[in-house]
Image: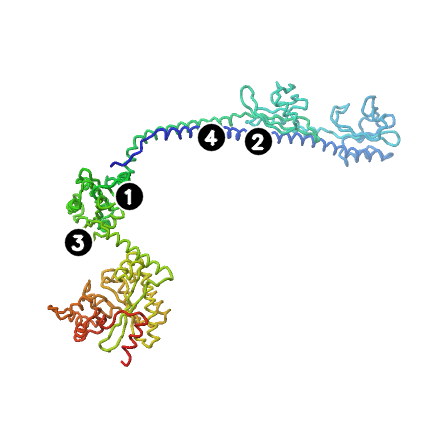
C-alpha cells in the first residue's frame, strides 16, 4: 500500500497571502500617517520653540524699557528734590556736583516767570520757556512734580527724559537725562530687528508680527507689511490668544505655521508667526511610503517564488516525510500508516512481518566510525530492495532495525525461507571496500494469520518480544512470536513491579532472606551461613532467585536490592553475636553490577559501622563473570576489603571463565565448587570425579574449599575423604528462617 500524500492547494497560500497583504496595507497606511504626524509634530514643536524664544525676547524688551524708565525716573526725582529744596544755595558749582552725584545730564533752575536763572553747565541762562513748551505747561499747571517720558529736546533734538519740580518761591527746577544710550541698548529688542534674525535660520521660510487688529506690522516679506490677515484658520488661532501650530499651503507647498502671542505688561499686544517649510518631513514620509510599497512588492515576489517552489518540491517533501533518506526505504511513519490502512474496517492482515536487527551495529560504529555505519545501513537498504518480491515491502524502522512485510508468505515455512534468504544475502561483505566481517543479525517473526490485531502498536510489541527471544539458543538467529513470550513478558512485568515496590517503599513483606548453614569439617561445627534471597509475587507465588535477580539486573534494580540484602544480612550477624556466636560468618552474593559502583566499598563499610558488626564477619560471594567485567577495578575493591578482613568467595567455580593465573592474581579466600560437580558424585557414575582435582588445585593456591549442593551421605563422605574444608547442602540442612537458623546453630554447636 502506498502512503497518502497531500495534494498541493494554492488556496492555502492565496487566502492567507491576500489577508496578509490587506493587513500590511492597513499597517502601512497607519505607519505612513504615524511617521507624517511624528515629523510634523516634531517640526511644529521646533517652530513653536523658536517662536517662543523670540516672543520672550520681545516681552523682555518691553520689561527692560519699563525697568529703565523707572530707574531714570527715580534718579530724576532724587535730583529734583535735592535741588528744589536747596533754595538760596543753587549755584552753578552746586548744580554740577549734584549732577555728578545723580548721574544726570541737565539741571536748570527757573524763576516764577519761567526764565532760567542757574544751570550746572552755564547753558541757556536767561532763556524763557515759550507757551506750549513742556516747561511753560508745567509752570502754569499747578502740579508739584512731573516726570515725562523720553522725548526730543526742543532746542537740540536729542532725546532726554525730563522731570519738573515746583519750588516754594513759585519757580521750578528741570532735570534731564540723555536717553541716547538707552535707545542704543533697546535697538537689539526692536521687532524688525528680531524678525530679521529669525529668518537667518535656513529652515525658516518667514516671520511676521501681527497686531491685535490682525494687521501685519512687521514681516520678513516687505510686500506684505500693512496687509490684513484674512485666512479664517489663522484668524481663529489669533483670536484664541493661545500658542498654536498648523499646516498651511503657500504657493502650492506645505508650510508649518507656529503662532505665539507677544505680551507687554501681561497684555497681549500681538502675535509672532514663524513659518517653516515641511519639505524635510515630506521627504521622510515619501521615503517610508516608497519603502513600504517596495517591501510589499518584495513580499509578493517571495510569495510567488514560494508558491512555485512549494508546488515543485511537494513530491520531494512527501518523500522526505514517508521515506528514509539514508536507505531510500519507506520509513516508520509510512509503515504505521500502511498497516493502519490495512487494519481499517477490521480487516485481517495477510502473510507475516519480520523485524530485522543488526546486533553488532554498536561495535561496527565503534570500530569503523559512524560514517561507515551509515554506509552499511544504506547498503542493507539496497540489498533488501533487490530481493523484495512482488507484494512484499521493506521499511527502515528505527536505528539499525528494519521491518519487512511479506504478504506473499502463506505459512511458517515461507517465513523461515525468507529468514534464511536474508541470512544468506548478508553473510558476506555488503559492498566493495567495506568491512570484511558480516553483520550479525537477529530477527523476530510474526505470523499475522495466527493473531488478531486491532492496532499497529500490538504488532510492534509482539515483534519486539520475538526479537528479544532470538538469542541463538536454538542455533538460529530468528524466532517466531508465540503466546509464551507474551506470558513471560507479563510475568517479568509483575516481578519487576514487586521488586520496585520493595526497594522504593517500606513494604518488604514480599522479600525475605533465608540462611543455609555451612559446616566446617576441620573444626566440626557450623562456622558460617549463606544468605539466600526469597521473593513471593502475588499471582505467581514463589519466584526463583535466578529469575528475579536477572530481572533486577536488567531493570537497574540490583543495586538498591543488593543494599537491602546486605542490610538484612548484617542484621542477622548482629543476632548471631547476641546469641554468643561472634565468629560465625555470613556469606552474601553480590552482583558484578554492584561491584562496578564507585562507592560500593564506601557504602558497605558505612553499613557495617552503622550496624556495629566486625568486618571479618562478612563474606562476599561473587561469580566468575567479574573476571571479564572491569576486572582490574573490581580487584582493587577486593584488595581494600581484604585489608579490612572481609573475605571474598568465588561462587560456581569450574563452570565459567576461571583460569589458574587469575586465581593467583585475585584477592579471594574461598572457592565454592559448583553443585553440578557434587551432583556427579554417586554410585552409578562410571567416570572420574573432577572434584578431587579441583580441591587439590585450590589448596595449592592457599584457598579454602566450600562444596555446595551436598545432598547424600556418599557425597559427604567423599568430600571429607578428599579434604574439602566446608560443606553446604540439604544433607546438612535446608535454608532456614532467621529464628530457625539461630536455633540450628545453637543445637549443632552446643558442646563442641
In the picture shown, does residue 154 fall above or below 631?
above
Per the model, the C-alpha gap separating discs 3 and 4 is 75 Å
- Image location (x, y in percent) of residue 752: 27, 80
Residue 308 or 205: which is nearer the viewer?
308
Per the model, the C-alpha gap separating discs 2 and 1 is 77 Å
Quarter occupied by the N terminus: top left
In the picture shown, does residue 37 fall above or below 739?
above
Q: Is residue 198 left or right of 594 when viewed as pictured?
A: right
Q: From the viewer's perspective, is the residue at label 2 or at label 4 nearer?
A: 4
Q: Name the residue under label 3.
A: 474
Residue 5 or 157: which is nearer the viewer?
5
- Image location (x, y in percent) of residue 7: 31, 31
Q: Name the residue under label 2.
A: 45
Q: Is mark 2 on a helix, strand or loop?
A: helix
- Which comes sooner in the sequence, label 3 or label 4? 4
Q: Is residue 498 left or right of 163 when viewed as pictured?
A: left
Q: Is mark 3 on a helix, strand or loop?
A: loop
Residue 454 got which mark? 1
Q: To which quarter of the image does residue 581 belong?
A: bottom left
- Which comes sooner in the sequence, label 2 or label 4? 4
Q: From the viewer's perspective, is the residue at label 1 or at label 4 nearer?
A: 1
Residues at discs 3 and 2 in contact (Cβ within 8 Å): no
Q: Name the residue under label 4.
A: 27
Q: To which quarter of the image does residue 60 belong?
A: top right
Number of other residues with Cα within 10 Å of mark 4, as a class: few under 14, some 14 to 19, many 20 or more: few
- Which comes sooner in the sequence, label 1 or label 3? 1
Q: From the viewer's perspective, is the residue at label 2 or at label 1 nearer?
A: 1
Report if residue 353 is visible in the image.
Answer: no
Per the model, the C-alpha gap separating discs 1 and 3 is 31 Å
- Which comes sooner in the sequence, label 2 or label 1? 2
Amino acid at each position: 500500500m502506498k502512503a497518502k500524500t497531500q495534494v498541493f492547494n494554492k488556496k492555502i497560500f492565496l487566502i492567507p497571502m491576500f489577508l496578509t497583504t490587506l493587513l500590511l496595507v492597513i499597517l502601512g497606511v497607519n505607519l505612513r500617517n504615524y511617521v507624517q504626524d511624528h515629523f510634523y509634530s516634531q517640526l511644529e514643536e521646533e517652530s513653536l520653540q523658536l517662536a517662543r524664544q523670540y516672543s520672550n525676547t520681545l516681552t523682555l524688551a518691553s520689561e527692560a524699557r519699563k525697568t529703565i524708565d523707572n530707574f531714570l525716573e527715580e534718579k530724576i526725582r532724587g535730583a529734583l528734590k535735592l535741588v528744589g529744596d536747596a533754595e538760596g544755595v543753587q549755584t552753578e558749582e552746586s548744580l554740577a556736583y549734584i549732577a555728578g552725584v545723580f548721574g544726570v545730564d541737565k539741571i536748570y533752575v527757573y524763576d516764577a516767570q519761567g526764565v532760567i536763572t542757574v544751570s550746572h553747565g552755564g547753558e541757556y541762562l536767561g532763556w524763557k520757556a515759550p507757551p506750549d513748551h513742556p516747561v511753560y505747561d508745567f509752570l502754569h499747571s499747578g502740579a508739584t512734580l512731573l516726570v515725562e517720558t523720553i522725548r526730543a529736546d526742543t532746542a537740540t533734538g536729542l532725546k532726554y527724559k525730563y522731570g519738573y519740580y515746583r519750588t516754594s518761591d513759585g519757580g521750578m527746577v528741570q532735570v534731564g537725562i540723555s536717553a541716547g544710550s538707552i535707545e542704543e541698548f533697546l535697538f537689539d529688542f526692536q521687532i524688525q530687528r528680531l524678525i530679521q534674525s529669525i529668518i537667518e535660520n535656513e529652515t525658516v521660510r518667514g516671520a511676521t508680527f501681527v497686531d491685535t487688529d490682525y494687521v501685519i506690522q512687521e514681516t520678513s516679506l516687505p510686500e506684505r507689511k500693512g496687509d490684513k490677515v484674512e485666512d479664517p484658520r489663522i484668524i481663529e488661532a489669533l483670536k484664541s490668544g493661545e500658542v498654536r501650530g498648523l499646516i498651511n499651503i503657500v504657493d502650492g507647498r506645505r508650510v508649518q505655521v507656529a503662532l505665539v502671542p507677544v505680551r507687554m505688561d501681561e497684555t497681549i499686544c500681538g502675535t509672532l508667526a514663524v513659518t517653516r517649510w515641511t519639505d524635510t518631513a515630506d521627504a521622510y514620509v515619501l521615503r517610508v511610503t516608497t519603502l513600504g510599497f517596495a517591501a510589499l512588492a518584495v513580499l509578493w515576489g517571495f510569495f510567488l517564488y514560494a508558491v512555485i517552489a512549494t508546488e515543485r518540491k511537494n513530491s520531494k517533501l512527501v518523500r522526505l516525510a514517508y521515506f528514509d533518506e539514508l536507505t531510500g526505504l519507506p520509513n516508520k511513519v509510512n509503515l504505521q500508516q500502511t498497516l493502519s490502512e490495512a487494519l481499517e474496517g477490521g480487516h485481517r492482515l495477510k502473510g507475516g512481518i519480520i523485524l530485522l536487527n543488526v546486533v553488532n551495529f554498536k561495535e561496527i560504529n565503534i570500530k569503523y566510525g559512524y560514517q561507515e555505519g551509515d554506509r552499511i545501513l544504506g547498503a542493507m537498504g539496497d540489498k533488501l530492495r533487490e530481493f523484495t518480491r512482488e507484494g512484499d515491502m521493506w521499511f527502515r524502522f528505527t536505528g539499525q532495525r528494519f521491518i519487512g512485510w511479506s504478504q506473499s508468505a502463506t505459512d511458517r515455512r515461507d517465513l523461515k525461507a525468507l529468514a534464511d534468504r536474508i541470512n544468506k544475502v548478508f553473510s558476506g561483505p555488503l559492498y566493495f571496500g567495506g568491512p570484511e566481517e558480516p553483520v550479525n543479525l537477529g530477527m523476530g517473526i510474526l505470523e499475522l494469520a495466527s493473531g488478531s490485531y486491532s492496532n499497529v502498536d500490538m504488532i510492534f510489541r509482539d515483534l519486539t518480544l520475538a526479537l528479544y527471544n532470538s538469542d541463538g539458543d536454538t542455533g538460529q538467529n530468528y524466532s517466531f512470536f508465540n503466546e509464551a513470550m507474551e506470558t513471560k513478558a507479563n510475568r517479568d512485568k509483575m516481578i519487576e513491579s514487586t521488586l520496585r515496590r520493595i526497594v522504593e517503599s517500606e513494604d518488604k513483606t514480599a522479600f525475605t532472606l533465608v540462611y543455609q548453614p555451612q559446616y566446617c569439617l576441620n573444626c566440626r561445627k557450623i562456622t558460617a551461613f549463606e544468605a539466600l534471597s526469597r521473593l513471593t509475587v502475588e499471582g505467581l507465588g514463589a519466584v526463583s532467585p535466578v529469575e528475579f535477580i536477572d530481572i533486577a539486573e536488567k531493570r537497574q534494580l540490583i543495586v538498591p536490592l543488593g543494599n537491602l540484602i546486605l542490610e538484612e544480612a548484617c542484621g542477622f550477624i548482629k543476632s548471631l553475636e547476641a546469641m554468643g556466636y561472634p565468629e560465625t560468618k555470613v556469606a552474601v552474593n553480590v552482583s558484578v553490577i554492584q561491584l562496578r559502583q564507585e562507592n560500593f566499598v564506601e557504602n558497605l563499610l558505612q553499613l557495617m559501622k552503622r550496624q556495629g558488626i566486625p568486618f571479618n564477619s562478612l563474606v562476599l560471594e561473587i561469580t566468575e563473570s567479574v573476571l571479564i567485567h572491569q576486572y582490574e577495578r573490581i580487584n582493587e575493591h577486593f584488595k581494600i576489603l581484604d585489608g579490612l578482613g572481609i573475605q571474598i568467595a568465588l561462587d560456581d567455580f569450574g563452570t565459567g571463565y576461571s583460569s589458574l593465573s587469575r586465581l593467583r592474581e585475585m584477592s579471594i579466600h574461598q572457592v565454592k565448587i559448583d553443585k553440578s560437580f557434587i551432583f556427579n558424585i554417586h554410585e552409578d557414575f562410571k567416570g572420574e570425579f573432577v572434584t578431587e582435582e579441583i580441591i587439590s588445585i585450590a589448596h595449592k593456591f592457599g584457598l579454602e574449599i566450600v562444596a555446595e549442593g551436598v545432598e547424600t551421605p556418599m557425597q559427604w563422605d567423599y568430600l571429607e575423604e578428599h579434604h574439602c574444608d566446608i560443606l553446604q547442602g540439604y544433607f546438612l540442612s535446608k535454608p532456614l528462617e532467621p529464628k530457625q537458623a539461630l536455633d540450628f546453630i545453637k543445637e549443632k554447636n552446643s558442646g563442641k
